[in-house]
């Protein structure tokens, strides 16, 4: 216990102070600090003895330690500090004791609020160095200075830490959270996911976006073909294991917006916006910065899935999919759906089909739908489509053969990509079955408790493989002509055997 000058102290502490509580405020900002800096916590709790030595009786001493393990640069999210201020303003507190009080308040605003309230209600403030009366001009000056200094100290510390982090990031060495499709080796090197199927799915998503042009289109494609996304478990007992999760819009959007897939190293892509932050939740308020606005962007540092050109094309397309700009090509028989822009107001025109399916109109209805304004304009679609069709055919005539060949090649490539995906799924299922089988046979037969579980796992793996095989044969991946040939072959064999029997 550090003793302070009894003469200085005795003059300030009056009997009316001793009639009220002595509050000891204990705080460490993070749980790690609570665990590691136990000495500091012990020292803070030791202030109870100091209160006793200053003349308070044991029942009069209250300890506020709600804020142990709570971080936060302001009083929000720290109920203990708020409780302290409330108790002071209810005239219940004679002295507030803390270890370096000014630092505990963290921000100058909180500190000055506490000083103000303490001055108003005649509460003393004490730390290891002495006891201060906020009503006294000199003490007030000293306390204010202490607050300013500790805030400056905090600022310098933070700056130094951030500068170090930034320098490391500029060398491309600062660790970052990796999105799906990438893993970090034990050496710290970042590589593509070693699982071939995981790599292929990421490639498939990026290729399909290039082909379909919309996020929704890609999502529907994945769902239609029962393709799941590879996810590496970030923490827990299964850390690092590959899990297959159903695709969703947010994940796909993140995948398409992330520059890492071009092989770039990025830092500062998710800056936090203080206006969006929720008190007491440090991870909230994150925004996504555009690639050029990231603090550090280093090209060609990691293995890439797509080129930078394709990535910027994708971003442009995603932006263009907004209502205001030119839209993607939609399905439907009209040639110009999603492409026509109104000459009067500059908004995209919608396509309307008549109920019998013969009629077609282009309507500028955006303002009517959004703001209940009168319909801007509309025009009959069929003559327009006819004219456009003629022009397109004329323009394409020389290249027609090439185009149709290209389309055929595209379809074939897509089919092969899907086929590979299914083959990989089957291979994985088969591996699971074999593994379960090996595990089952490796266990001693007497160890029934374990054997039963393993048997069940083996059974499940077998069922999964069978289901996969069944859905593969059901799906349209096998060419109709293949089926036809197979069926014909079977029929011929049947016929042959029947003929033999008859003969
Ligand atoms: Zn219009």
Image (cartoon, helix red, strand yellow):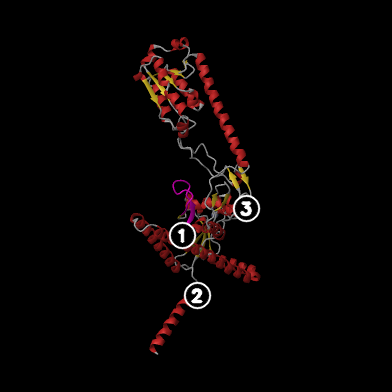
Between 289 and 466, the one lying in front of the other is: 466
2 or 1: tag closer to the N-terminus: 1
Q: Check disc 1: other Cα within 10 Å, few if <14, some if 14-19, many if 20+.
A: some
Q: Earlier in the sequence, mark 1 or mark 3?
A: 1
Q: Quadrant of the N terminus?
A: top left
Work out whether 116 lies above or below 354.
above
Q: Which residue extends farthest right?
A: 398
> Whole-percent x and y of residue 181?
53, 53
Can you give x and y, in whole percent of width and height, for residue 342 in the image? 56, 56
- Name the N-terminal-most of marks 2 and 3: 3
**Place of residue 402 in the rendered image (x, y in percent of width and height, measured from the top left):** 63, 70
Q: Which residue is mark 2?
A: 481
Query: Residue 455's quadrant in the figure?
Result: bottom left
The residue lying furthest to the bottom in this view is 503
Is disc 3 placed on a helix, strand or loop?
helix
Q: Quadrant of the C terminus?
A: bottom left
Q: Are marks 2 and 1 in contact (CB under 8 Å)?
A: no
Q: CA distance from mark 2 to mark 3?
A: 40 Å
Magenta part mainly helix, strand or loop?
A: loop
Left/right of residue 43 with respect to residue 414 in the rendered view: left
Residue 235 belongs to magenta span? yes
Give neighbour class at mark 2: few <14, some 14-19, many 20+ (Cα, 10 Å).
few
Q: Is residue 322 visible?
A: no
Which residue is the site of mark 1?
Answer: 223
Q: Residues within 10 Å of mark 3 (few under 14, many from 20)?
A: some
Where ligand 1 lies, by quadrant? bottom right
Q: Residue 86 in magenta?
A: no
Residue at position x 41%, y 87% from top? Answer: 500
Residue 308 disc label: 3
Alpha-carbon distance for marks 2 and 1?
25 Å
What segment is highlighted magenta in the picture?
A: 227-243
Q: CA distance from mark 1 to mark 3?
A: 28 Å
């Amino acid at each position: 216990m550090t003793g302070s000058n009894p003469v200085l102290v005795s003059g300030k502490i009056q009997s009316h102070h001793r009639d009220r509580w002595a509050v000891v405020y204990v705080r460490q900002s993070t749980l790690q600090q609570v665990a590691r800096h136990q000495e500091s916590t012990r020292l803070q709790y030791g202030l109870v003895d100091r209160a006793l030595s200053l003349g308070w009786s044991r029942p009069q001493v209250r300890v506020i330690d709600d804020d142990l393990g709570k971080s936060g640069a302001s009083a929000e999210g720290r109920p203990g500090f708020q409780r302290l201020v409330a108790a002071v303003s209810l005239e219940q507190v004679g002295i507030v004791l803390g270890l370096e009080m000014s630092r505990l308040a963290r921000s100058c605003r909180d500190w000055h609020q506490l000083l103000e309230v303490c001055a108003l209600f005649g509460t003393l403030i004490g730390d290891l160095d002495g006891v201060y009366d906020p009503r006294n001009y000199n003490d007030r000056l000293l306390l204010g200075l202490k607050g300013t200094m500790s805030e400056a100290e905090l600022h310098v510390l933070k700056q130094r830490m951030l500068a170090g982090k930034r320098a490391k990031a500029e060398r491309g060495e600062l660790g970052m959270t990796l999105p799906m499709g990438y893993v970090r080796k034990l050496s710290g090197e970042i590589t593509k996911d070693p699982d071939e199927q995981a790599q292929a799915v990421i490639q498939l998503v990026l290729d399909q976006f290039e082909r379909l042009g919309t996020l929704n289109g890609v999502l529907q494609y994945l769902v239609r073909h029962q393709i799941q996304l590879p996810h590496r478990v970030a923490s827990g007992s299964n850390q690092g294991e590959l899990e297959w999760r159903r695709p969703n819009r947010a994940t796909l959007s993140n995948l398409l917006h992330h520059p890492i897939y071009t092989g770039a190293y990025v830092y500062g892509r998710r800056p936090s916006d203080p206006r969006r932050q929720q008190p007491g939740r440090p991870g909230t308020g994150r925004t996504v910065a555009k690639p050029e606005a990231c603090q550090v962007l280093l090209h060609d540092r990691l293995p890439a899935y797509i080129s930078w050109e394709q990535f910027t094309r994708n971003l442009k397309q995603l932006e263009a999919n907004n209502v205001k700009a030119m839209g993607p090509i939609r399905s439907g028989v009209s040639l110009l759906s999603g492409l026509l822009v109104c000459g009067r107001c500059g908004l995209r025109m919608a396509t309307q089909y008549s109920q019998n399916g013969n009629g077609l109109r282009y309507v500028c209805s955006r303002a009517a739908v959004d703001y209940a304004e009168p319909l801007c304009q509309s025009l009959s679609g069929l003559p327009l489509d006819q004219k456009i069709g003629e022009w397109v055919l004329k323009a394409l005539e020389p290249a027609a053969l090439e185009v149709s060949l290209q389309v055929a090649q595209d379809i074939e490539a897509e089919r092969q990509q899907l086929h590979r995906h299914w083959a990989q799924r089957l291979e994985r299922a088969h591996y699971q079955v074999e593994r379960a089988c090996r595990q089952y046979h490796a266990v001693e037969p007497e160890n029934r408790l374990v054997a039963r579980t393993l048997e069940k796992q083996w059974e499940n793996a077998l069922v999964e493989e069978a289901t996969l095989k069944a859905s593969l044969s059901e799906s349209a991946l096998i060419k109709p002509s293949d089926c036809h040939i197979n069926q014909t072959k079977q029929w011929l064999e049947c016929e042959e055997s029947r003929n033999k029997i008859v003969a």
